[in-house]
Image (cartoon, rainbow, N blue to C red):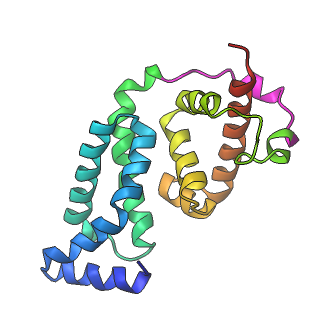
Amino acid sequence: MNHEEEQRLIRRVLGGDAEAFAPLVECYGRPIFSLVYGIVGRREESEELTQDIFLKAYTRLVTYGGRSRFSTWLYRIAYNTALSAVRPKRHLFSLFDEARLERVADSSPEEQSFAHRKELREEALLRALDRLTPEERALVQLHYYENRPLAECGEILGLTENNSKVRLHRIRKKLELWINEKS
């Protein structure tokens, strides 16, 4: 859906046509669910949260203002909602020894493409992804699975573009360590 169509639908919703919100839900329902599921990790809870997110977006649409793309605004709501759902469970996520990152060469994650490393077994990668914090998983989901530019990822997650780039670099290094560690 292009920007003009979104803006037209938003004006209709704000003008009282509640049914005009349905195409926005249809367009963004699956990607929002994917982001939430990537953070929360449980299907049923992710489905409920996705519904909550669209309800929040509908009721807060008057605050949208058009300063960013609608999708960015919606993803921000989704990210915050999903993060709030997992915050009480934060202690379940792996603590990471930051000093281990310093021992990984900066060039190795860049030289071997994250998406094309043939020697990585999918199972090892999935286990490593599960060890990431919800915030880290959201960044991976947005950038690698949804192909969102770093600037937009940063806007959604409340980071600068440069900070998003640095965090992705650190995430790749963590994943490499976890994938290569002996079980």
Residue 24, by quadrant, is bottom left
> What secondary structure prevails in the magenta region?
loop
Looking at the image, is 123 positioned above or below residue 26?
above
Q: Please provide percent x and percent y for residue 27.
A: 35, 68
Residue at x 50%, y 24% (from the top left corner): 93
Task: From the viewer's perspective, tell me whether residue 54 is left or right of residue 30.
Answer: left
Q: Please provide percent x and percent y for residue 57.
A: 27, 62
Q: On the rendered image, what quadrant is the C terminus found in?
A: top right
Q: Please provide percent x and percent y for residue 134.
A: 48, 36
Looking at the image, is 82 positioned above or below residue 54?
above
Residue at x 41%, y 35% (from the top left corner): 41
Q: Please provide percent x and percent y for residue 86.
A: 37, 33
Q: On the rendered image, what quadrant is the N terminus found in?
A: bottom left
Residue at x 28%, y 54% (from the top left corner): 53
Residue at x 69%, y 52% (from the top left corner): 165
Q: Can residue 103 be found in the magenta stretch? A: yes
Task: From the viewer's perspective, tell me whether residue 65 is left or right of residue 13.
Answer: right
Residue 48, by quadrant, is top left
Q: Can residue 134 be found in the magenta stretch? A: no
Which residues make up the magenta segment?
93-107
Q: State the count of labels.
A: 0
Q: Nearer the viewer, residue 140 or 182?
A: 182
